[in-house]
Amino acid sequence: MAPSEGSGGVTVTAAPPYPSAARISDSPCFPQYTASLKCLEEFNSDKSKCQEHFDIYKECKKKEREARLERNRNRSLFS
């Protein structure tokens, strides 16, 4: 979030609305995430109309997690 000027001329940086908000845009699954949200907006939160988007996002997150676990497994504790 952008910094803003608070009382007394002090610059204040607003915290993200939830802890992971600052990182979701860094995820390789961000396009699938935004597609899911756009679908919900388009269909007035009717989840049944967006199931395909949810499934694609879920699969992406699964692959992302598997890749992270593999990277962690390959790390040496003594390097």
Image: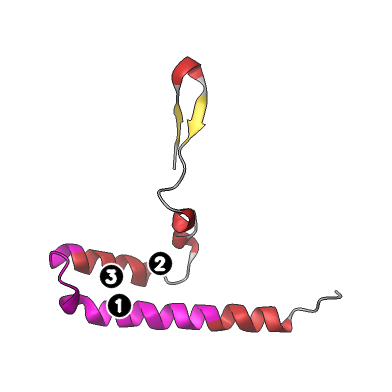
The N terminus sits in image quarter? top left
Mark 3 to mark 1 CA distance (whole Å) = 6 Å
The C terminus sits in image quarter? bottom right
User: Residue 33: which quarter of the image?
Assistant: bottom left
The crowd level at tag 2 (other Cα within 10 Å; few <14, some 14-19, many 20+) is: some
The disc, 3 or 1, on the residue closer to the chain's N-terminal end is 3
Three-letter residue code for mark 1: Phe
Helix, strand or loop for disc 2:
helix
Left or right of 26 in this view: 70: right
The reply to whether discs 3 and 1 touch (Cβ–Cβ < 8 Å) is yes
Does residue 22 sit above or below 5 in this rendering? below
Q: What residue is shown at x 61% (from left), y 81% (from top)?
A: 69
Looking at the rendered structure, which numbered label has been put on residue 36? 3
Mark 2 to mark 1 CA distance (whole Å) = 12 Å
Q: What residue is shown at x 21% (from left), y 69% (from top)?
A: 39
On the image, numbered disc 1 is attached to which residue? 54
